[in-house]
Amino acid sequence: MNGYAILGWGSLIWDLENLAPRVRGDWAMGAGPVLPMEFTRISPKRKLALAVCLDAIHGVGCVTNAIASVRDDIRSVASDLARRERAPEQHIGAVCLASDHKNGTSPEIIAAVHQWCLAEGWAGAVWTDLPSNFNEQLGDAFTVSRAIAYLRGLTGDSLDEAVRYIENAPAATDTPLRRALAGQDRGGASIPDINTAVSAINEGFDECRFLISCNGGVVHLNVPNGVWPNGQDWRREERGRPLDFAALVNRFDSFGSITNTRYPLGREAGAVAGFEAEPVYSFRDWLLPSLRNQRR
C-alpha cells in the first residue's frame, strides 16, 4: 500500500505551512475522491473570509487532491493536520483500513474516502472536517445570494483575504458560489472543457496584435516597434470601444497578468493573440465597483 494520504481542496494546496516537513512529494492534483463542498464556513483563521469546507447539504461534488504523509500511523497523520488547521482532532476526518479506525461527521464522506483508499491502494487518509457555520454565524441558512451579500459587506483585510482565498483555490473546487462570483453560467461545461476552449483561442489568435470584443469594439496595442517600454504593457483605447471595455496598465484580469484587459463579467469576452489566456476567477471589482475609478 501507499501509506497514508492527506486530502486537500483549499488553502492547504498552496500553503502547507507547518505540515510541510510531514509530507513527501507533491500534491497529486485531481487524484483524490469526489466530495461535496462549498464556501459555507466563516473562518476566524481567515479573518472572517468564507472558506471552503465539506458540506453534504449545500455542497456539490468536487474532485479533491492528495499528498503522502511521512507518518506510519493514522493518529499521527491526523495530529499533524490538526496542528496545521489549528483545529481539535475531532474535526479531522480519518479512515484507516488496517485498524478500521474511522472519524468524521458524515457517514457518506467516510464511506467515499474508504472506497477511494481501497481503489487507489492507500492504507488510509485524513482530511479537514471543520463544519459549515454560515447559519450559526449569520442566523440565516446558506444561499449563494446571501454568501455574495456577506462578501460585499467585507472590508480591508477581511476582503483581501476573501479574494485571495477564493481565487487561489484549485480550479476543481468548482462550487455554485464560485461560479456565481465568476459572473458566468458555464452551462454544464467542465473545467477541462474550458481549458480546451481557451487553448483554441490562444491558437486561433496567434500572430494577431489587437483585442476584439464580442460586439465588435477594438482596443489596439500601442507598442512602439513591438517593444514593451520598461517591461510594461501600454495600450491606447480605441474610440468606439464597448462601454467599460478598457485596456489598462498592469491590471489583473481574466486573461492573465500581461494582457491586462477588463470587461463586465458575463457580457463580453476578448483575446490577445501572442499571449496565453487563462480561465481564472476574478471578482474584486465586481464585488466593489466603487473601487474601479480609484484603481485606474
Image: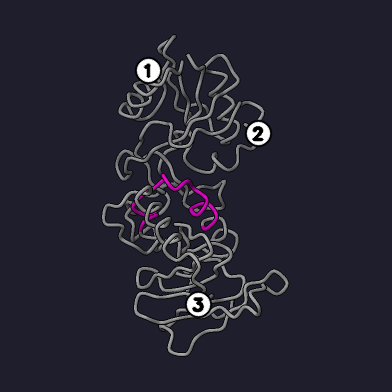
Residue appearing at x 50%, y 77% in the figure = 290
Relative to 167, is 227 on the left or the right? right
- Residue appearing at x 57%, y 19% in the figure: 76
Looking at the rendered image, the disc whose residue lies closer to the viewer, 2 or 1, is 1
Foreground: 108 or 173? 173
Question: Looking at numbered disc 3 in the image, what kind of residue is underneath it?
Answer: Ser
Inter-mark Cα distance, 2 to 1: 29 Å
Q: Earlier in the sequence, mark 2 or mark 1?
A: 2
Q: Residue furthest bottom?
A: 239
Reading the chain from its start, which is encountered first: label 2 or label 3? Answer: 2
> In the structure shown, which secondary structural element does the residue marked by tag 1 occupy?
helix
Who comes first in sequence, dot 3 or dot 1? 1
Q: How many marks?
A: 3
Depth check: 69 or 201 in front?
201
From the top left corner, tell me how far across and down residue 200 is, in percent: 40, 58
Q: Report which residue position mark 2 lands on.
A: 18
- To which residue does mark 3 refer? 290
Which residue is label 1 attached to?
118
Q: Are marks 3 and 1 in contact (CB under 8 Å)?
A: no
Circle 2 crowding by C-alpha within 10 Å: few under 14, some 14–19, many from 20:
few
Q: Position of residue 221 (x, y in %)?
A: 56, 78
Residue 274 picture location, percent across and down? 53, 65
* Position above or below: 62 against 188: above
Q: Nearer the viewer, mark 3 or mark 1?
A: 1
Residue 177 is covered by the magenta coloring? yes
Give, as a single range, the part of the protein colored magenta: 163-179
- For label 2, the SS is helix
Q: Quadrant of residue 294?
A: bottom right
